Amino acid sequence: MAEHASADCVIVGGGIGGAVLALALARHGHRIILLEREHQPVLATRPEILARSTLEVFHRLGVGDRIMHDAVVPLQALEVYQAGGKRLFELSTTAFRQANAQPYSTDPAATRRILLESASATVYVLRGVEVTGLLREAEQVVGVQAVRGQDSLTVNARLVIGDDGVR
């Protein structure tokens, strides 16, 4: 079966970047379709460092307090080790203070969940979608071609954004 949809913007990838962009554009009245490859939110917890400016963006979007409460831990120091136990480097409390920085670690799955829940009234999220190609009119990209299970999906949009991490 083939499905067809259209929006002002299609965003490929529901990570933190894609989710923030979807929420910001939706808050400005744009119709957004967000395509996410994973069928379910990723449950693997891994730390991700947030800069103060990222948290400021979360606050401007109205989700900062919830993310700070539900998904973030302030860092007092940071040590990075190589497999086998060799320490590669350390950032101490003193180093953070000298840089006038208060870094935070977030659970990216929880952060994405909060962002997408906040945008769900105005962002249509499709999970389990693998983008297979771009739709073009002359030299302009006007949408994406994708598959969802056994179904093909065409999404037309004035703006197409790919934020699919390493892929």
Image: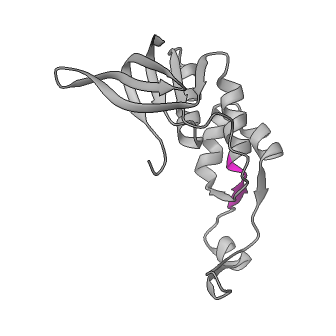
User: Viewer-proximal residue, 166 or 107?
Assistant: 166
What is the tally of numbered marks visible in this picture?
A: 0
- The percent coordinates of residue 115 (x first, y second) are 67, 33
Tell me the quarter of the picture where residue 99 sits: bottom right
Region of the chain picked out in magenta, as a range = 103-108
Residue found 36% across the figure and 21% down from its top = 143
On the rendered structure, is 151 left or right of 46? left
- The image quarter containing residue 61 is top right
Residue located 39% across and 17% down the image: 157
Q: Residue furthest left?
A: 138
* As drawn, 103 above or below 137: below
Q: Position of residue 138 (x, y in %)?
A: 16, 20
Q: Residue furthest bottom?
A: 86
User: Is 43 located above or below residue 132 in the figure?
Assistant: below
Q: Residue drawn at (43%, 26%), measured in percent from left and top?
A: 146
Q: Is residue 58 above or below residue 30?
A: below
Q: Is residue 134 magenta?
A: no
Along the line of sight, the residue nearer the viewer: 134 or 86: 134
Tell me the quarter of the picture where residue 101 sits. bottom right
Whether the magenta-drawn stretch holds residue 106 is answered as yes
Q: Is residue 153 left or right of residue 58?
A: left
Residue 159 lies, in percent from the top left, at: 37, 23
Q: Residue at x 59, y 49 (%)?
A: 53
Answer left or right for 158 relative to 86.
left
Rendering coords of residue 74 (x, y %): 77, 60
Tell me, what colour scheme is on the image? one colour
Work out whether 1 lies above or below 54: above
